[in-house]
Image: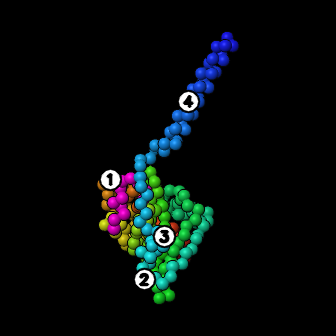
Amino acid sequence: MATRRRTSNHLILAFLLLVHAGNLAWSKSGDRSYPEFVEQVFLTEERALKSVFPDSENVDRDVHAFTEVERKKIESRLGWTLSEKEVTVYRGYRNGAPSGYALITEEIGKFKPITFIVKTSNEGKIERIDIMVYRESVGSEVKRQRFLRQFRGKRAKDPLRINRDILNVTGATMSVQAITAGTKKVLVILEELYLKK
């Protein structure tokens, strides 16, 4: 009886070691849950700010940590939970006068985050969006201005519904949703933190 139990324990141990070895080999060969992708960097932070504030003599940077009240207001308007604890808001100045706001944000596309910058006027209307880093294996058509121009003139109060207000891009639906959600988030944050004051 003792011999049978010892043999059974050896078999279980051998099986567990085999599973563990398989898991190690699997993890060393790469994460299989994501397709292959190439990180495409289109703009650094410096170049993105020059792109959205081309005529500004200087750009101020304000790192703002959300208060609980601000977070609740923003989340209530968006209908989802903010992942950020703080945001960095940029403000350009031309001839000593403010020339709008910009915020760099990230949203998950299908698998990976898409990094982009949203620039608004002093009144909170979108003037420009640029994709900075794209990490998905497909759907990079969303980086084209032909798609991004659709957001121009939109405000926080405007609905940004895909295939109504914003035309979808075939094969890039998840990326379109990510950019649309991120843009709405930026508009609401800017309105709540800066434009209402």
Left or right, 112 with reference to 21: left
Q: Quadrant of residue 182?
A: bottom left
> Which one is closest to the eye, mark 1 or mark 4?
4
**Residues under numbered marks 4 and 3 in contact, where contact means CB atoms less than 8 Å apart:** no
Q: Quadrant of the N terminus?
A: top right
Cα distance in 3D space between marks 2 and 3: 17 Å
Residue under label 2, please give it. Answer: 55
* Residue sitting at the far bottom: 95
Q: Nearer the viewer, residue 35 or 106?
A: 35
Q: Earlier in the sequence, mark 1 or mark 3?
A: 3
> Which one is closest to the eye, mark 1 or mark 3?
3
Q: Earlier in the sequence, mark 4 or mark 2?
A: 4
- Region rendered in magenta: 134-145
Cα distance in 3D space between marks 1 and 3: 28 Å
Tell me the tag on residue 45. 3
> Which one is closest to the eye, mark 2 or mark 3?
3
Residue under label 4, please give it. Answer: 18
Q: Earlier in the sequence, mark 1 or mark 4?
A: 4
Residue under label 1, please give it. Answer: 171
